[in-house]
Structure formats: structure tokens, C-alpha cells
Image (spheres, rainbow, N blue to C red):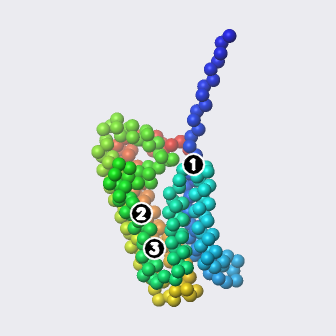
Amino acid sequence: MSTETTPSAAKPAPKQENALLNILLNVLLPVTVLSMCSKTGDKLWHIGPKWALIVAVLLPVGYFIYDYIQRRKINAFSIIGFVSVLFTGGLGLMNLTAQAFGIKEASVPLILAFIIWWTGRGEKPMVRTLLLNPDVVDVAKVENAIAANNARPDFDRLIKTSTWLLVATMLMSAALNYFLAIYFIDGKEPGSTEYTEAIGKQTGWGWVVIGVPSMAMMIFAMMRLFKGVKRLTGLETEQIMLPR
């Protein structure tokens, strides 16, 4: 009697992160809550600065837990969103001066700039994780093609210049964050309604004045990196990206 061997089940592809949900819950909604809900008034959404901070912090924390359950991976953007919201809301409750608040606003992108620069000096640059996300890009195929084409030195230079582009983006963000905080908060009495409203305006306008240029520079860095990867590997975009 012949026995028929059953082929082993293929290993399921890892779950891919929802980029829109990531940005929405780690960045956009927490900023909106801090901006619109920190007031105390007769509007339903005016829940006061303390409750607004709690709600804003719970959003990235909740997404971090949800994403970890789904993918079993630590979401760095949730951690950054949590720290940023906690800094903005928590230090806002401390009624800091405009200069101190500006330094606080500049501190997060400065820390990110340092981390990107520091990891760029080693064998595992952060820029590779950010721009060549293994959940989106077939990193193994890219690495094999680079080795086959003897393009490692050119690829390392490409990573290095992409690292400096992201460092420059973070430094620009830090400077703009500081001066924007000074512009909106300077002259406002700490603890006053005008002070709270100024923090909300500074946070909201930050995404227009800072977020848009920073996003544009990151998109440029990503497109430049992808163009360089295609040139060095001979792979097309659909070959570089993991199938969805």
C-alpha cells in the first residue's frame, strides 16, 4: 500500500503593519486630543488638561499593545509617540516658561538625530530599519543582489548619505520646534487659559510648519534610497517590496 506524503504547510507570511493606523493613533489623534480637549469649558470635548493628557497617552499605549499582539514586534513609533505626548502634556501641566517649553519641544528630535547618527556609525544603522523596513521590503533579496553585484561599498555610501539626510531632518525639526514654541507661548502667563490654548496652537501648527517639511525630506530620502537600491541591485520595485 502506497502512502502519499502531504507537503508541509508553508510558513505564513508575517502580518504587516497598517501604516495609516500607526500614524493616526501614534501621532495625529494624540496631537488632536491635546490641542482640542485640554480646555475647560461647556463643550463636550473640553475635558481639561489632565484628562486630555491621559486620553492622548492611552492612544499610543493602546496601539503598542494591539500591534504587539498582532505581530509580536515592539513598535518603536508607539514608544516615540508616548514619550512625545507625555512630554508635551506633562510638562504643559508644569506651567513651564516659553524657553523651557521650547527646549522640551526640541529635545525629542535632537535625541532622534543623535540616535540616527550614532547607529549610523555601526553595522546596524537605524536608517536601514526606517527606510528598508523588513515588514515591507524583501531585505534578504536586496542583500543577495548587492552581494552578487559586488555593490557593497556603493550601498554603504548610500546608507551613509541617507543617514545624514535624516539627521539633517531631525535637526531642522528641533530648531523649528523651539522657535515655534517661543512664538506662541512667549508672554503667556503659565497656567492661564491663554497658556493652554497657546500650547494647543503650537502643537497643531507644528504639524503644518514642521511635519510637512520633515515628511517631505523623509520621502525624498526614501525615494533616493529606493532609486539607489534599484540601481545597485538591478531589481524592480515589485521585486524589492514584499507581496502584500
Residue found 35% across the figure and 48% down from its top: 123
Residue 121 screen position, x and y as percent:
32, 54
Identify residue type, mark 1. Arg
- The Cα atoms of the two marked residues, 2 and 3, are separated by 12 Å
Residue nearest the viewer, comparing 104 with 20? 104
Residue 186 screen position, x and y as percent:
46, 86
Instruction: Tell me whether circle 2 and circle 3 mark residues in contact (CB < 8 Å).
Output: no
Q: Earlier in the sequence, mark 1 or mark 3?
A: 1
Q: Which residue is mark 2?
A: 112
Q: Which residue is mark 1?
A: 72
Q: Earlier in the sequence, mark 1 or mark 2?
A: 1
Identify residue type, mark 2. Leu
Identify residue type, mark 3. Glu
Q: Which residue is mark 3?
A: 105
Q: Hey, which quadrant is residue 37 in on the image? A: bottom right
Describe the element under mark 3 as helix, strand or loop.
helix
Is any atom of residue 25 visible in this view? no
